[in-house]
């Protein structure tokens, strides 16, 4: 692996660890005494430090080591979790991130020194100056297993530490000297004590290490994550009562503990192994002699020591134990096989593009085969279509990520902004497991930041104002996600002061966006805030109020083929609803035709198809409504909307679509059928065409336009309202 590739692997892993570090630090703010979270923080810092040192990022390793030392004091109960400590730790996380991003890998040293000075001050304030200096300066020595412990440390009263067997095997075709492991073993000794280390060089080279530590197995495994040495490593925890199995029988538990403490324990080789290694006896002879030996059960039965029935009963118990062990091993292997691998986003995007092209070719093949009327070709075409569908679904499934990966980033945003504005705000999240296409998630980040900043700045009141209104001093923002049909619905709710319809309307009239006597619904009034430059803020802050942002949010959501709506009650809070498609790559669509032009309607929005005759049009007195089983449903004619040439057929088709509980019809000449739609972006010239969200390539190579149903919905409903 090249230096650039190994560095990139380290950086990707470090970014993930920094994300975990930030999440854990924010969780500590709610549960400061949770040792599991404290250990997660320490483990993340320790891994970044160790791997940073291994890959030559010495500045990162040194800085992280200082922060890790402070959290070792927290782990040992010498330093309590406090808000200043968490704030500085979050700043340290940001500084490590900036060091990773910088070309030199060092970042701004003055910033780093300031953070470390702050951490020392926090330790000094909590422990007293002299004690803090001693603790900070000696914490590293305390981590060193070679450091001398006082004779009366009462270590026998502490719980026994975990024991691990670590097998390090050299990869085939490589030759690794024992000295090559020194750096790894030094890191290992920071976590505990190496009780024995044996090098084996029979058929292959491998090390058998017995390690004792109070760290968990994951922390031990992390030591070996970033090694360039061509070895495979297996770490397994060994129960103390099973420890003798590794080193031969030990009659007395005290003797075993004494062997462990003194490091005298070592694997005991079998007699046959020793004779073969010395060359005294060939291994084939040993195998032959062992094969001639009678099983123990037979020998005991022959001597009359025990009956055959009891022997058979014992053998049955032994076989059951073997089967259980085999089943456990298979289960472990399945878990190991299910481990994930890291794939770059570029490779994944390229895979999706290839699948999209395959879907188009498959559609073309199906169209050609349908004209040949050859049963064998038809069967092959149907099999290709099935495989294409499965490959498409599998590939898109790989791109799906839980939206919680985005939600978790906003805890820090809410914490920092509320602190800057002197507010007390809790962020609650629901539906973090809801999956969405990774491209949608990536583009959704900035719009959500804008909306959350506005909720924090304009929505949630300061603690004194909330108390005066009889509310809790702490405001609440809830970020939730859920599946709704073929879409994902994201809600941002706050319990703040809400929006004043009168203030919004007055500002819109002042800016000339609406007339003073124009009749608007509540939804239309609230949607005015998405107009460019619209703001009701009385003062400009560092957070918001300049009249920019909400129109950007609207455009970003439109680009994602989504919709955004606002509902607010003055004095009670605001709810912002965002609806987004699951994916931007491939969708199932309903292909329709108008004249010689073809269109695709997203199948997830289609409810049913009905006929529209000239008689139906006459009965509606020229108005574009259809009576659908007693329900009046408005419709829009695609022929008129896009000015398609030619006359309508005597019997047209209405595709009934549903969105947000409302229904409209889309009138077309013919409904062709379902179509697997690979979405292609429109060029800049056509990007702002109303009613079109993209295009796709049909089986015959021609284009079909994808209808933007949400925009058509808004147009039709506005016309219905204007008509009274």
Image (tube, grey):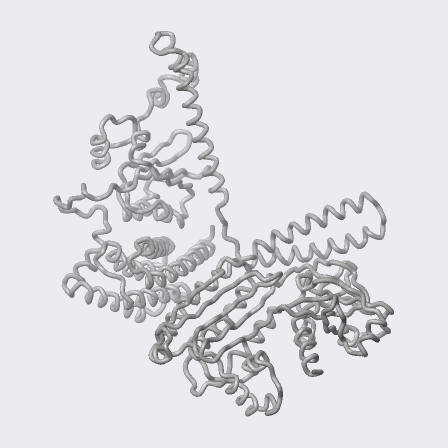
**Nearer-the-camera pick, 660 or 708:** 660
Q: Position of residue 330 (x, y in %)?
A: 48, 35
Residue 698 placement, left or right of 88 = right
Residue 193, compared with residue 613, is above or below; it is above
**Residue shown at the point (61%, 58%) measured from the top left:** 350
Tell me the quarter of the picture where residue 652 sits.
bottom right
Of all residues, the one furthest to the front in this rendering is 630
Most foreground residue, 245 or 454: 454
Front position in the image: 39 or 287: 39
Q: Quadrant of residue 135?
A: bottom left
Residue 59 in sight from this viewpoint: no
The residue shown at (44%, 24%) is 319
Q: Position of residue 315 (x, y in %)?
A: 42, 19
Q: Is residue 444 visible?
A: yes
Left or right, residue 95 beside residue 453: left
The image shows residue 602 at horizontal and vertical percentages of 68, 64
In this view, which residue lies farthest toward the top?
303
Q: Position of residue 628 (x, y in %)?
A: 75, 67
Q: Residue furthest left?
A: 152
Quadrant placement of the C terminus: bottom right
Position of 27 relative to 417 (above/below): above
Number of dots carrying numbers? 0
569 or 702: nearer the eye? Answer: 569
Compared to 147, does 567 lie above or below?
Answer: below
């Amino acid at each position: 692996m090249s230096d650039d590739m190994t560095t990139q692997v380290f950086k990707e892993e470090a970014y993930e660890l920094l994300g975990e570090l930030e999440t854990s630090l924010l969780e500590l703010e709610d549960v400061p005494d949770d040792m599991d979270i404290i250990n997660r923080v320490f483990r993340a810092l320790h891994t970044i430090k160790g791997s940073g040192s291994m890959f030559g990022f010495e500045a990162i390793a040194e800085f992280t080591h200082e922060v890790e030392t402070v959290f070792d004091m927290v782990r040992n109960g010498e330093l309590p979790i406090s808000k200043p400590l968490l704030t500085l730790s979050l700043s340290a996380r940001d500084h490590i991130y900036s060091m990773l991003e910088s070309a030199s890998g060092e970042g701004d040293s003055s910033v780093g020194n300031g953070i470390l000075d702050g951490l020392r001050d926090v330790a000094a304030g909590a422990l007293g100056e002299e004690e803090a200096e001693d603790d900070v300066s000696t914490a590293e020595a305390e981590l060193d297993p070679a450091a001398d412990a006082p004779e009366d440390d009462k270590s026998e009263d502490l719980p026994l530490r975990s024991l691990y067997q670590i097998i390090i095997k050299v990869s085939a075709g490589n030759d690794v000297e024992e000295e090559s492991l020194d750096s790894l073993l030094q890191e290992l000794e920071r976590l505990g004590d190496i009780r024995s280390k044996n090098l084996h060089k029979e058929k292959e080279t491998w090390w058998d290490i017995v390690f004792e530590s109070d760290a968990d197995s994951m922390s031990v495994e992390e030591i070996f994550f970033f090694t360039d040495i061509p070895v495979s490593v297996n770490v397994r925890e060994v129960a103390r009562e099973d420890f003798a199995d590794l080193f031969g029988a030990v009659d007395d538990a005290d003797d075993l503990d004494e062997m462990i403490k003194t490091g005298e324990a070592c694997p005991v080789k079998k007699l046959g192994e020793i004779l073969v290694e010395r060359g005294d006896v060939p291994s084939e002879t040993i195998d032959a002699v062992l094969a001639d030996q009678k099983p123990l059960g037979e020998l005991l039965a022959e001597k009359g020591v025990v009956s055959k029935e009891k022997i058979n009963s014992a053998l049955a118990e032994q076989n059951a134990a073997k089967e259980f062990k085999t089943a456990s091993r298979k289960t472990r292997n399945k878990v190991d096989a299910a481990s994930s691998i890291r794939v770059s986003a570029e490779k994944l995007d390229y895979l999706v593009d290839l699948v999209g092209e395959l879907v188009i070719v498959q559609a073309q093949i199906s169209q050609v085969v349908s004209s040949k009327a050859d049963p064998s070709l038809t069967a092959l075409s149907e099999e290709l279509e099935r495989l294409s569908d499965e490959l498409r679904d599998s590939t898109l499934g790989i791109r799906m990520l839980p939206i919680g990966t985005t939600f978790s980033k906003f805890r820090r945003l809410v914490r920092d902004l509320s602190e800057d504005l002197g507010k007390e705000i809790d962020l609650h999240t629901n539906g973090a497991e809801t999956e969405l296409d990774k491209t949608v998630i990536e583009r959704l980040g900035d719009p959500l930041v804008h909306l959350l900043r506005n909720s924090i700045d304009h929505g949630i009141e300061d603690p004194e104002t909330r108390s005066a209104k009889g509310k809790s001093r702490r405001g609440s923002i809830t970020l939730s996600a859920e599946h709704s049909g073929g879409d994902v619905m994201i809600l941002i709710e706050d319990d703040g002061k809400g929006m004043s319809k009168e203030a919004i309307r007055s500002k819109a009239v002042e800016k000339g966006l609406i007339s003073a006597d124009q009749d608007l619904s509540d939804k239309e009034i609230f949607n005015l805030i998405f107009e460019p430059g619209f703001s009701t803020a009385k003062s400009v802050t560092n957070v918001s109020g300049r009249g920019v942002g909400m129109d950007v949010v609207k455009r970003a959501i439109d680009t994602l083929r989504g919709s955004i709506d606002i509902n607010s009650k003055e004095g009670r809070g605001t709810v912002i609803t965002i609806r987004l498609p699951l994916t931007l790559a491939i969708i199932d669509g309903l292909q329709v035709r108008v004249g010689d032009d073809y269109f695709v309607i997203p199948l997830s929005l289609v409810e049913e198809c009905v006929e529209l005759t000239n008689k139906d049009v006459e009965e509606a007195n020229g108005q574009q409504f259809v009576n659908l089983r007693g329900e009046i449903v408005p419709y829009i004619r695609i022929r008129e909307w896009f000015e398609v040439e030619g006359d309508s057929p005597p019997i047209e088709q209405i595709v009934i679509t549903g969105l947000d509980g409302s229904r409209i019809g889309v009138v077309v000449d013919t409904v062709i059928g379902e179509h697997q739609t690979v979405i292609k972006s429109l060029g800049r010239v056509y990007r702002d065409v109303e009613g079109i969200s993209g295009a796709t390539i049909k089986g015959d190579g021609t284009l079909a336009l994808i209808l933007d149903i949400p925009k058509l919905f808004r147009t039709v409903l506005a016309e219905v309202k204007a008509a009274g």
